[in-house]
Amino acid sequence: DNIDYYAFVDKTYSNIKVWNQKKICDFSTIDDYSNRRNAKIYKVLPQLFLPGYDYYIWCDANCIFKQNPVQLIEQHSVDAIFFYHYRYNTISNDIEKIIKRKKDHLINIDNYIDFLSNSNYIDDMLLQFSMFITNTSHESMLMRLIWWELICKFSSRDQISGPYAIKKSKISYHIINQSLGHVTPLSSDNIGIKFHTSKHD
């Protein structure tokens, strides 16, 4: 009762009592994955459409919080709260899956691989961005802007660009080591893409 609820929708519905409905804009014309960007801008840059809030709590339509997210905010004095990935622990693992299942144009993935390699990125983290929380600190806003730049320049798969944005922005964060229940485990893929890695604590 102390937060506002917004749903980004492609069409509005009547008799909705809790959710404030915000109709999305079809702005992206880059490639075959324009619909993905049309949806993701609200996840990545909510402050453009809903200014004036202290925190932004994102939840995909097929997810539900098991705990009051406000309690999570009160428990952790950080800029952001994320969830570890349910199966993989590196970007390279997820890229293997994307290539195997043809979830993006190969040139987008290849360019991003080159970018990470040239950046000397340490590939030691993969998160689920189906649910996450950030405040409105300078670091949080910087993280979101870097994230959106990567989505537009490289792959529109936000999961592989989020970790880089988090590290580059130096945002303070807490990661919940718990699987999100809506995810269906997938069989492992082996394509052999590797970056420089370091072990999780």
Image: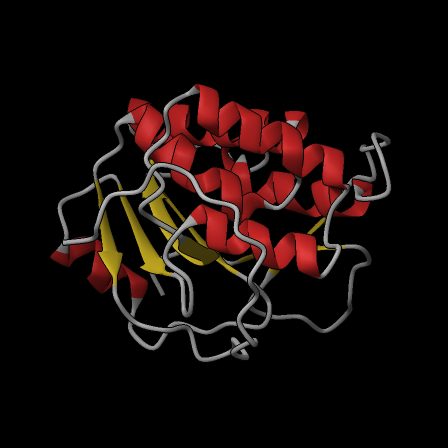
**Viewer-closest of 137 and 162:** 162
Q: Is residue 36 above or below residue 172?
A: below
Q: Is residue 50 visible?
A: yes
Q: Residue at x 26, y 32 (%)?
A: 171
**Viewer-closest of 26 and 1:** 26
Q: Is residue 161 above or below residue 8?
A: above
Query: Which picture quadrant has residue 16?
Result: bottom right
Q: Residue at x 34, y 60 (%)?
A: 83
Q: Residue at x 80, y 40 (%)?
A: 34
Q: Residue at x 85, y 35 (%)?
A: 31
**Where the N terminus falls, by quadrant?**
bottom left
- Lateral position of residue 25 relative to residue 119, left or right: right
- Where residue 112 appears, as percent x and y from the top left, is 58, 31
Q: Is residue 171 above or below residue 60?
A: above
**Where the C terminus falls, by quadrant?**
bottom left
**Viewer-closest of 70 and 77:** 77
Q: Is residue 164 above or below residue 102?
A: above
Number of labels in the image equals: 0
- Lateral position of residue 127 relative to residue 32, left or right: left
- Where residue 25 appears, as percent x and y from the top left, is 79, 39
Query: Which picture quadrant has residue 143?
Result: top left
Q: Is residue 4 visible?
A: no
- Lateral position of residue 5 relative to residue 135, left or right: right
- Where residue 187 appears, as percent x and y from the top left, is 56, 76
Question: What sort of colour scheme is used for the picture?
Answer: secondary structure
**Viewer-closest of 201 and 33:** 201
- Where residue 8 appears, as percent x and y from the top left, is 66, 53
